Image (spheres, helix red, strand yellow):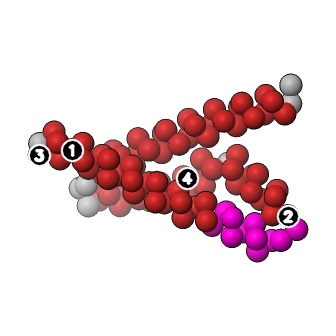
Amino acid sequence: MSQRNEILGVFLGILLLIGMHILAIIAIVLLGFIRGTYAIQIWIIGGFSFFLWQLLYVIPVTLWLKRRRQYDLMKGVIIGAVITALLNGGCSLLFSSQVFP
């Protein structure tokens, strides 16, 4: 496989993960609307623990891609998941230091 195809596969894996993130965000928002009175608490907890939600769908997808031998897509999904976890953790630390000095 050429280097160009591998880069394209990694990029497509990141796009796949972005699509799954959009679905997870929609699920968090809908869960907040269903609960009604506790919507803001659900949205805040869902936002701060997004990396835990991410584990619910990243691990099965990576195992499925590994079984199908689509290693480039799997690399992209893993790279996107790590970037998401680092951004989520950094933003959570920044927000917690602003709110709780």
Q: Which mark is residue 1?
A: 3
Measured in 3D between alpha carbons, the distance from the residue under mark 3 to the one under mark 4, in whole angstroms, is 30 Å
The residue shown at (86%, 30%) is 100
Spot occupied by residue 31 in the image (x, y as percentages of width and height): 71, 69
User: Which tag is nearer the camera, tag 1 or tag 4?
Assistant: 1
Measured in 3D between alpha carbons, the distance from the residue under mark 1 to the one under mark 4, in whole angstroms, is 24 Å
Measured in 3D between alpha carbons, the distance from the residue under mark 1 to the one under mark 3, in whole angstroms, is 7 Å
Q: Which residues are magenta?
A: 27-38
- Main SS of residues in magenta: helix
In this rendering, the answer to whether 64 lies above or below 73 is below
The residue wearing badge 1 is 6
Q: Which mark is residue 38?
A: 2
Measured in 3D between alpha carbons, the distance from the residue under mark 4 to the one under mark 2, in whole angstroms, is 22 Å
Q: Tell which circle, 3 or 4, labels the residue nearer the N-terminal end.
A: 3
Q: Quadrant of residue 30?
A: bottom right
SS for tag 3? loop
Q: Amino acid at mark 1?
A: Glu
Residue 68 in view (yes/no):
yes
The residue wearing badge 4 is 54
The residue shown at (69%, 64%) is 29
Quick one: label 2, few (<14), some, or many (20+) residues within 10 Å? few
